[in-house]
Image: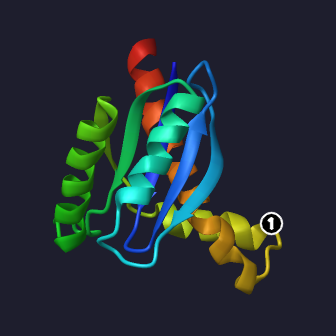
């Protein structure tokens, strides 16, 4: 069973995919768009990836504030979640994404990626962090 992880932003969607066993998340790609509300091509690309990787579940980063409050981005993410569910027919699970972008930036800095090149990788790395957090939580539940 493969799981797709998404980091949904105003102009990009970072994408990661799990291995077949659901243990590790690998960054896959960043989908970009010119306008925040133009989602047709973004949804079509996600639908393609779902088919290519035989995805059974989608995990979508949920951007709560650090104080656990939900802001404007949460509402947009919930709308995107509904679009994904209608388009793919798959369950879409919201996963707290606080600190995922910060963690991705830190890993890229430690890896020596130049500041001007980090933007190319940060969204898909954040998606991998979101997905890995979800899979670790699910795997820990199964062990208990």
Q: Please say whether residue 68 is visible from this viewpoint.
A: no
Left or right, residue 22 beside residue 114:
left
Q: Nearer the viewer, residue 2 or 105?
A: 2
Left or right, residue 98 beside residue 26:
left
Q: Please report the residue visible at 65 percent of the width from the left and 69 percent of the height from the top.
A: 106
Left or right, residue 70 beside residue 81:
left
Residue that label 1 marks = 111
- Position of 88 relative to 139 (above/below): below
Q: Pinpoint residue 53: horizontal percent, then vertical percent.
A: 58, 29
Q: Please say whether residue 8 is visible from this viewpoint.
A: yes
Q: Please report the residue visible at 25 percent of the width from the left and 69 percent of the height from the top.
A: 73
Q: Pinpoint residue 127: horizontal percent, then vertical percent.
A: 52, 53
Element class at badge 1: loop
Left or right, residue 79 beside residue 7:
left
Image quarter (top left, top right, bottom left or bottom right) of the C terminus: top left
The outermost residue toward the bottom is: 116
- On the image, which quarter does residue 67 sit in? bottom left
Q: Pinpoint residue 26: horizontal percent, then vertical percent.
A: 65, 42
Q: Please report the residue visible at 20 percent of the width from the left and 46 percent of the height from the top.
A: 82
Q: Please report the residue visible at 43 percent of the width from the left and 48 percent of the height from the top.
A: 44
């Amino acid at each position: 069973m493969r799981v797709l992880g998404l980091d949904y932003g105003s102009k990009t969607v970072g994408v990661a995919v799990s291995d077949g066993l659901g243990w590790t998340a690998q960054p896959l790609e960043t989908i970009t768009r010119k306008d925040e509300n133009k989602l047709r091509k973004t949804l079509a690309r996600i639908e393609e990836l779902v088919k290519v990787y035989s995805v059974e579940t989608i995990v979508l980063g949920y951007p709560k504030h650090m104080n656990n409050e939900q802001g404007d981005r949460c509402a947009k993410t919930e709308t995107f979640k509904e679009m994904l569910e209608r388009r793919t027919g798959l369950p879409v699970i919201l996963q707290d994404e606080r600190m995922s972008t910060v963690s991705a930036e830190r890993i890229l800095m430690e890896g020596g990626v130049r500041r001007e090149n980090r933007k190319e990788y940060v969204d898909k790395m954040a998606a991998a962090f979101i997905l890995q957090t979800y899979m670790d939580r699910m795997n820990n539940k199964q062990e208990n």
